[in-house]
Image: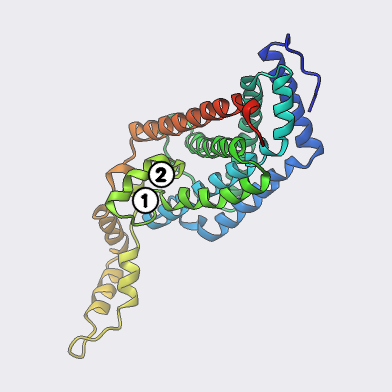
């Protein structure tokens, strides 16, 4: 880091100084490795759960949750160590005239660019592996842009949370110790994937995964998709005998002979719709708003914490 920052240098000048330093670190200190890591993780998710994403209700819920998890993972790894690994330098330069706001804005810009690249890579990998994308859009003219914006907001929100943790942690070891706990909180309190006690549902509002998962399901028109769980369960039970007969098998065969399977699956989906996943622009905009609110809050707290770095005796 440039150790000759002068007090007379303005915030904008300092922002560009540190932004340049971050891009040099990206090129010469292997920070670029987060990009191929994003591609690998996206490929694994697409292979594991991508075939039914935006095809069935169950596949959409599982796939959307997996994509949100990838975003959280990417965001955390982007910035979990960036401040704590140079805490002594930041402290020294703050005493020499460094504006903490300039330092954080530089990180915000750099991390935003990094998150955009990661989202583009994720979408490219998923589409290359045949993962379906929504056919209709709600906010922009292009469905893939809508989904990309959601993925970016999840990633960037997690990124800024990790930046906050990095500003508080004493060492990189401490930061990396906290990260798995925060990952578990984000995943467990996603609000739609795990069956939580009703009294615990309020805590889902504090996680990026809840808002990201909801937006992704709404964008994929979750409630119009077929549900296959009931059908698959019935198929597994078709050989059960009742008084020497197999009534379930006969029903399934009748449905198949009359080409009614798709109708049954759609009807099953109608019976299991979730209002919070309606194909509604207001739902998506509400999710985006909450992701932005949490992101801004993390940034403000990070600035407040680092403004007190001179009093830090560590």
Give the residue furthest to the bottom.
Answer: 244
Which residue does the image show at 27% across and 54% down from the upper left?
272
- In this rendering, the count of numbered labels is 2
Q: What percent of the width, then of the height, locates residue 212?
A: 44, 41
Specify few, some or many for label 2: CA neighbours under 10 Å numbering under 14, 14-19, or 20 or more: many
Residue tagged by mark 2?
A: 210
Q: Which of 168 and 45 is in front in this view?
A: 168
Q: Residue at x 23, y 55 (%)?
A: 271
Q: Identify the secondary structure beneath mark 2.
A: helix
The disc label shown at residue 70, or none: none
Where disc 1 sits, the SS reads loop
Quarter of the image holding residue 211?
top left
Q: In this view, does 119 lie to the left or right of 141?
A: right
Say whether residue 109 is visible.
no
Relative placement, left or right, of 119 versus 203 is: right
Where the C terminus falls, by quadrant? top right
Taking the view exactly as shown, the residue that stands out farthest to the top is 8
Please identify the residue farthest to the left as the structure is shown: 243
Identify the residue position indicated by label 1 in the image. Answer: 192
269 left or right of 122 in image? left
Relative side of 246 to 225, left or right: left
**Marks 2/1: CA distance?**
7 Å
* Quadrant of the frame with the N terminus: top right
Mark sitting earlier along the chain (2/1): 1
Q: Quick check: marks 2 and 1 in contact, CB under 8 Å? A: yes
Figure quadrant of residue 98:
top right
Please tell me whether residue 49 is drawn above or below residue 90 in the rendered image.
below
At x 66%, y 14%, the residue is: 11
List x then y, in percent, for residue 9. 73, 11
């Amino acid at each position: 880091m440039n150790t000759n920052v002068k007090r007379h240098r303005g915030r904008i000048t300092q922002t560009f100084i540190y932004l340049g330093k971050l891009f040099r670190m990206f090129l010469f200190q292997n920070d670029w490795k987060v990009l191929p890591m994003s591609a690998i993780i996206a490929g694994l998710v697409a292979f594991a759960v991508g075939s039914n994403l935006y095809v069935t209700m169950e596949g959409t819920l599982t796939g959307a949750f997996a994509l949100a998890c990838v975003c959280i993972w990417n965001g955390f790894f982007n910035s979990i160590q960036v401040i704590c690994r140079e805490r002594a330098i930041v402290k020294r330069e703050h005493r020499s005239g460094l504006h903490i706001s300039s330092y954080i804005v530089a990180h915000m810009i750099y991390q935003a660019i990094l998150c955009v690249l990661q989202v583009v890579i994720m979408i490219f990998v998923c589409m290359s592996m045949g993962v379906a994308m929504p056919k209709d859009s709600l906010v922009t003219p292009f469905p893939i842009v809508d989904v990309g914006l959601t993925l970016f907001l999840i990633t960037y929100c997690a990124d800024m949370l990790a930046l906050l943790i990095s500003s508080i942690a004493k060492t990189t070891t401490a930061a990396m110790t906290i990260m798995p706990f925060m990952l578990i909180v984000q995943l467990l309190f996603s609000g739609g994937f795990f069956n939580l006690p009703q009294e615990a549902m309020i805590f889902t509002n504090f996680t990026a995964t809840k808002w990201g998962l909801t937006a992704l399901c709404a964008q994929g028109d979750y409630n119009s998709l077929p549900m296959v769980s009931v059908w698959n369960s019935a198929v597994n039970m078709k050989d059960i005998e009742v008084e020497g007969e197999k009534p379930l098998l006969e029903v399934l065969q009748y449905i198949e002979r009359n080409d009614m399977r798709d109708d049954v699956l759609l009807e099953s989906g109608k019976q299991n719709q979730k209002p919070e996943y309606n194909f509604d622009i207001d739902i998506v905009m509400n999710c985006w708003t909450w992701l932005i609110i949490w992101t801004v809050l993390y940034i403000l707290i990070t600035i407040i914490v680092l403004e007190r770095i001179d009093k830090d005796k560590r």
